[in-house]
Amino acid sequence: MKEFKHFINGEYVASASGKTFENRSPVDNSLIGQVHEAGEAEVDAAVRAAKAALKGPWSKLTQNQRAAMLNKIADRINERFDEFLAAECLDTGKPRSMASHIDIPRGAANFKEFADSMNHPTEGFRMDTPDGKGAVNVGHRTPKGVIAVVSPWNLPLLLMTFKVGPALACGNTVVVKPSEETPATATLLGEVMNECGVPPGVFNVVHGFGPDSAGAFLTSHPLVDAITFTGETRTGEIIMKAAAVGLRNVSMECGGKNPGLVFADCDLEKAVEGTMRSAFVNCGQVCLGTERVYVERSIFDQFLARMKEEVAKLKLGRPEDPDANFGPLVSLEHRDKVKSYYDLAREEGATVEIGGGIPDMGAELNDGAWIEPTIWTGLPEDARVIREEIFGPCCHIRPFDTEEEAIELANDTSYGLACAIWTENSARALRVAEQMEVGLAWVNSWFLRDLRTSFGGAKQSGIGREGGVHGLEFYTETKNICIKL
Ligand SMILES: NC(=O)C1=CN([C@@H]2O[C@H](COP(=O)(O)OP(=O)(O)OC[C@H]3O[C@@H](n4cnc5c(N)ncnc54)[C@H](O)[C@@H]3O)[C@@H](O)[C@H]2O)C=CC1
Ligand SMILES: O=C(O)/C=C/C=C(\O)C(=O)O
């Protein structure tokens, strides 16, 4: 039986209250271990350790020394690849084949890439003054301070390190609150930090839930200087309210109801392959995933038929099954939520093209959070299934007649995270991409990520951009020093 403790000031500590909660496998609902739930005392200890570390040996490191340390962390994750992989797959149930290509390598890359790209550029402006002697302005960047990292369960290591990597590269210290569903890889990362000589207090982890628990205690702690969050939009709103006290900065990467636009001039097989991944990889639990697909009428039937063929080939199975490419949802609670949308789709008048239920996985797995990959057609655009983020392996496919109609349908949502456009006409691709109300537009691809690019959403999908130098704005404070000559 595993025991997941907090990682505070370089040490693993239990909760003083003795309070723990269960961590269960979504594959078969077996007990993985007990997780310590942080109270205000543990969160306070973690934040104070992070605050103190800002003035310790960490602050004396040069940019190059810090970058070297981050590179070492990346190398160490890769050396301990199998342990991270096992931990991530145990918590999430996702196929090893997926986590070994996406989650763990990206977890390491998030340290390596940002180690080198977050060099603080100094801006300079010379100005005239009435006495003719002039002045020089120097924009000087300093770390923002203690960063609270509140992260979700769908890509636990990847999404947490996408924040921790640049935060540390800029010289901040962090307190991470991983999702209660997936405590393992954040806990393991504490060991790596110690092995790499990261000073105590620079990286801290507190476990627990959101409201009245670790998440709320952390985001309302007065010594936290900024909060970076990935998760549901409603949770983002609550965290923003907490951040308003003391005027702390927030970076929010929230939900999506992302469209795919498939034009008749696309390469059909590429469009099918990409849409399949965007709707079904990670059991549909990707904020960038496509839940609404709009297809030009002349290829609608052909596209739908090919999608159904591919869905029928998905192989459900345990993470370690080399043939499996489709795992369970993260929890029974989330399965209930997704299943409720499957039922709602029928009530709202959908045609269930494939899937729509809970599969029979056999006696060993039937207690797990399994759900069928599902395609619907025939829903009106005001159906809740079309408007609300489901975060499961499902999509609705609908025909369109003109480019203008496709753009209008795609943009008719309160979210604005991502879209995927499938066309071989590059003028059309750019024209459509420019009109999409999103932070990320992919053309003939999906989830193709260059960490130097901006990442974030428009409308209710988020606030701010991270990635590349964009993170500098969030993770540093700029001070203008004006020197009169
Ligand atoms: N990447 C994304 O956009 C994600 C979206 N979701 C969406 O959110 C839905 C619910 O999933 P949850 O894990 O419950 O997402 P959530 O937004 O509730 O949780 C994300 C993180 O925020 C924390 N949290 C929750 N309430 C908090 C509060 N009041 N103060 C501080 N921290 C708080 C959680 O403990 C977790 O670490 C999913 O069904 C899905 O639709 C979930 C995970 C990732
Ligand atoms: O590549 C990234 O940095 C992030 C990818 C996915 C998400 O943000 C998500 O699913 O939440």
Image: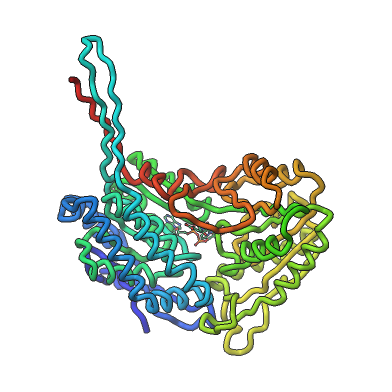
Q: Tell me which residue sits at (74%, 61%) in the image.
A: 268
Answer whether residue 209 is visible to the viewer in this image: yes
Q: How is the image coloured?
A: rainbow
On screen, residue 150 above or below 249: below
Residue 184 position, x and y percent, is 39, 72
Q: Nearer the viewer, residue 477 or 110?
A: 110
Q: Tell me which residue sits at (62%, 62%) in the image.
A: 278
Residue 367 position, x and y percent, is 58, 82
Q: Nearer the viewer, residue 417 or 152?
A: 417
Left or right? Give the position of 162 relative to 328: left
Viewport quadrant of the C terminus: top left
The furthest residue to the top: 130
Residue 244 position, x and y percent, is 39, 41
Q: Quadrant of residue 193?
A: bottom left
Viewport quadrant of the N terminus: bottom left
On screen, residue 18 above or below 64: below
Number of marks drawn: 0
Answer whether residue 48 is visible to the viewer in this image: no
Q: Tell me which residue sits at (59%, 49%) in the image.
A: 441
Left or right? Give the position of 116 relative to 409: left
Q: Tell me which residue sits at (66%, 58%) in the image.
A: 291
Left or right? Give the position of 468 relative to 275: left
Residue 288 position, x and y percent, is 57, 56
Q: Nearer the viewer, residue 271 or 148?
A: 271
Q: Nearer the viewer, residue 188 or 330?
A: 188
